[in-house]
């Protein structure tokens, strides 16, 4: 006996995908393509989503590191092991097992990255309201910056208030505010030391390309997957995006902006 069975369902979700993020030029689009691309070196274990204009660190013959950033939603003390980050679809979605740290504000030479103001965007009526913005950057880089990192041990999403509650394995050791941006830490490098220090460098110090279009990614662990699951991708550069519709950008990333127009990020 043979049974023919067809099953269909519809689902809907609200994500940042589909909302305009690229700066449109009346003379046509331009981009620089990274033709060979590389393997994603920091994939999530579960389901993931890459957003248009999300930043990537591309290193030829090595691979691609996805730049993930999280904006803190509520102030927390330096001994806090429960913190809250934005779940508005602009910050990334955190995952159990991630190692997070506070994004640096100090350069290798000791000079500070100063961002006086950033452009604002009114999402309600999709209008860009440009405010005066100045960026003062002294010479240097973040190659020797280290900070305390913490492993995420639990994630709870509060859809009503658009926030993630994160439980950390240890405190970050520094009070955080709603102006704080968290990024992934290179905890593997610290763990490889004979005597781990409990601090590490940022995982993605040099974001240099963009994700061009929204993409959904399948899990790389669990769900019956055996062996190693790899994602290979190509990124683009020489494009411009509205900062207000990108992921949260810490000062060390904003310092790389090549645009002289307020509110636009160009790399």
Image (cartoon, rainbow, N blue to C red):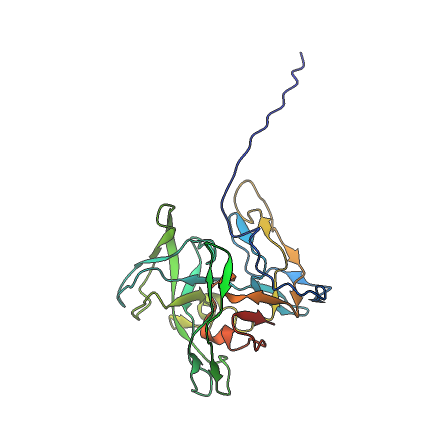
Image point (30%, 60%), residue name: 81
Residue 80 visible in rendering: yes
In this picture, is 175 found above or below 234? below
State how many labels appear: 0
Question: Which is nearer the eye, 12 or 146?
Answer: 12
Residue 186 percent location from the top left of the image: 48, 68
Left or right: residue 240 versus residue 33 is left
Residue 54 percent location from the top left of the image: 56, 61
Say which quadrant the N terminus sits in: top right
In this picture, is 166 found above or below 2? below
Image point (41%, 65%), residue name: 182
Say which quadrant the C terminus sits in: bottom right
Residue 166 percent location from the top left of the image: 35, 55
Question: Which is nearer the eye, 241 or 44?
Answer: 241
Question: Which is nearer the eye, 265 or 207?
Answer: 265
Residue 195 visible in rendering: no
Question: Which is nearer the eye, 76 or 47?
Answer: 76
Residue 195 percent location from the top left of the image: 40, 72
């Amino acid at each position: 006996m043979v049974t023919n069975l067809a099953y269909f369902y519809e689902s809907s979700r609200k994500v940042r995908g589909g909302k305009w993020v690229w700066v449109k030029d009346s003379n046509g689009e331009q981009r620089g393509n990274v033709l060979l691309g590389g393997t994603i070196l920091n994939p999530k274990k579960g389901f993931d989503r890459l957003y248009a204009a999300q930043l990537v660190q591309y290193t030829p013959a090595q691979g691609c590191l996805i730049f993930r950033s999280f904006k803190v939603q509520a102030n927390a003390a330096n001994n806090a092991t429960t913190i809250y980050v934005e779940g508005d679809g602009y910050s990334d979605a955190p995952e159990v097992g991630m190692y997070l740290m506070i994004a640096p504000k100090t350069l290798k030479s000791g000079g500070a990255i100063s961002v006086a103001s950033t452009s604002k965007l009114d999402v309600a009526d999709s209008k860009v309201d440009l405010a005066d913005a100045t960026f003062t950057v002294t010479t240097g880089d973040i190659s020797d910056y280290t900070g305390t990192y913490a492993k995420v041990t639990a994630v709870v999403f509060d859809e009503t208030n658009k926030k993630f509650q994160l439980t950390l394995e240890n405190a970050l050791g520094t009070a955080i505010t709603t102006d704080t941006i968290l990024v992934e830490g290179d905890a593997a490098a610290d763990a490889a030391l004979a005597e781990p220090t409990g601090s590490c460098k940022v995982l993605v110090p040099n974001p240099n390309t963009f994700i061009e279009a929204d993409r959904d990614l399948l899990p790389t662990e669990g769900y019956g997957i055996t062996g190693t699951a790899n994602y290979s991708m190509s990124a683009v550069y020489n494009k411009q995006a509205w900062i207000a519709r990108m992921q949260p950008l810490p000062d060390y990333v904003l310092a790389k902006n090549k645009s002289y127009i307020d509110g636009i990020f160009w790399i």
